[in-house]
Amino acid sequence: MNTNRHLSKTVGGLLSATLLAVMPLSALANGQAPFAKDKGWAPPVGDAPHGRLLIDRLEYAAGDNEDSVNLDFKAWYGGDYNRVWLEGEAENVVSGGSGGAIENLDLLYGRLISPYWSVQAGVGYQLEYGPGPNHDRGYAVLGLQGLAPYWFEVNTNLRVSEDGDAWADFETEYDFLLTQKLVLQPRFSTKVAFDEVKEFGVGQGINNVKIGLRLRYEIKREFAPYIGVSWNKKLGDTADLVKAEGGDASDFRLLGGVRMWF
């Protein structure tokens, strides 16, 4: 009996979480929080404008062949239902080579479609510079971000360039609270290209898998230094393009950086 009762509660909890994740847009469009009207609760969220800048990663990455400084940030302004986002990810080689890349710089409009998920759409820019000629391109982007069951943060995007090249990326991460201040964060990301673009070293198919592990200490919630490791493995046609240029398809790095928000 105890086992059946526990199983019933678990299934009920999972069903509730699933319903929350797929609530229709109409309730939000009417300015109501999900279930607020039926239950008579006050809406827990609103649309009063406010903003935040999160520097998720500002780090020095030391590898076997080269070292780089990496930046990953998100800034937004708006309410809980409608927001404008500016997101970017960049890498600059500082030792063992030269050059770098703005992997993405996106200007997006975001709309909440359920308590845990929002859709984003907008435009973006990508640049790879030195050594050799620079390459850049603009693109349109459609994305989805939010919290999956068990509190996994998910961010996935489909991008189509001005030349018609298309690719998609997926990233997920999770925060393990080891103590009130010590947090272990694993991160997984991958990219899939639907077209080969040699100027950017991109082959058709799955481009790579990247796994990171960062241990941060929150001196305060707004400022947290961290250490960690990352491993990036190029795959398929992309790996062949890297090897043809004399590069290594696998890259392991030690990390040290800071996470902060304002």
Image (spheres, rainbow, N blue to C red):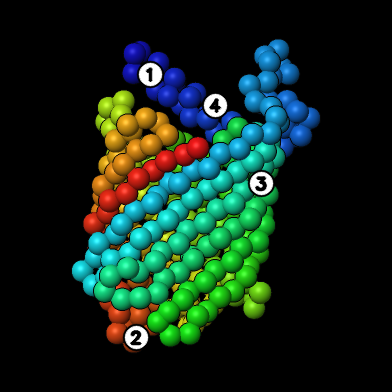
At mark 3, the secondary structure is strand
Task: Name the residue: 46% across, 76% down.
Answer: 129
Q: Give the residue pinned by disc 1.
A: 6
Q: Residue at x 41, y 71 (%)?
A: 100
Q: Residue furthest right?
A: 30
Residue 16 is tagged as: 4
For label 4, the SS is: helix
Looking at the rendering, which quadrant does residue 180 occupy? top left
Judge by depth and name the residue closer to the eye, 27 or 52.
Answer: 52
Separation of residues labelled 4 and 2 (CA atoms): 51 Å
Q: Nearer the viewer, mark 4 or mark 1?
A: 4
C-alpha separation, residue under disc 3 versus residue under disc 4: 30 Å
Q: For marks 3 and 1, give the CA distance.
A: 43 Å
Considering every residue shown, the one lying at the far left of the view is: 64
Where does the N terminus fall, quadrant-wise? Answer: top left
Residue indicated by mark 2: 245
| Disc nearer the start of the sequence (3/4) | 4
